[in-house]
Each structure stands twice: as structure tokens, then as C-alpha cells.
Amino acid sequence: MTTAKEQLIQELERTPDFIVQEVLDFLLFVKLRLKQKTREEQIADSQQSPGLPSFLQFVEEVSAQVPREEWERLPNDLSKNLDHYLYGSPKAEVA
């Protein structure tokens, strides 16, 4: 007894190229939809699970890799004057 994969390969060998291209396009479309559906389910699961969302977990992991001395080198007014430090805009007054 042949498997579905073996049977499909046999059929493809006897099929004109333009039909094989259509079948390939359809197969890739189905795989993409399955991947998107799986990703949506993972997002839904992560939103329902307790703890930090995955983006915040990522930020936390990256932050943990930066030595404390480097964090201390950041200006105290970085969040308020981000444009100043990035683009040279005039500095805002910090209260």
C-alpha cells in the first residue's frame, strides 16, 4: 500500500508543469496559513498565561545581559530628552 506522499509524487511525475506549479502554489499557501494559525494560537495562549508577555520577557532578558556599570552611564534624563541624545534637539528642562 502506497502512502499519500508516494501517490502524490507519482501523480506529479505524470502531470504537466503548469499544473504542478498550481499545486505547488496551493501547497505553499496552505503551509503559510497553517503557520499563521499556529502563531495566532501561540499569541492567544501567551496572553492567557500568567507572567510577563513575551515581548517584556525579551526586554527583561536583554536588560539582564547589560552590565550595571553600563546602565549607570546612561543620563538620568534620557527618557525626557531622548530626542536631544539621539538627534541633538534642544534639551528639555527636567524638574
Image (spheres, rainbow, N blue to C red):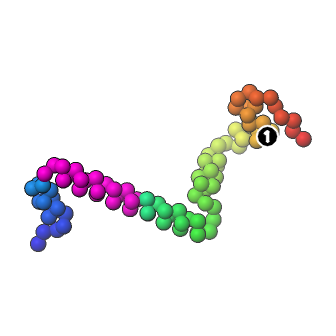
Q: Is residue 65 left or right of residue 13?
A: right
Residue 28: percent from left, percent from top: 31, 54
* Front-most of residues 75 and 83: 83
Q: Residue furthest top?
A: 88
Disc 1 packing (10 Å; few <14; some 14–19; many ≥20): few
- Residue 72 relative to residue 16: left or right: right
Residue identifier under label 1? 80
Per the rendered image, the range of residues in magenta is 16-35
Q: Where does the image place residue 15, in percent across and percent down from the top left?
A: 12, 55
Residue at the image point whose x is 28% and y is 57% from the top: 27
Task: Determine which quarter of the picture holds residue 73.
Answer: top right
Asked if residue 17 lies in the magenta stretch, the reply is yes
The picture places residue 95, in percent across and down from the top left corner, at 90, 41
- Which of 75/46 is in front? 46
Residue projecting furthest to the left: 14
Tell me: residue 7, above or below residue 76.
Answer: below
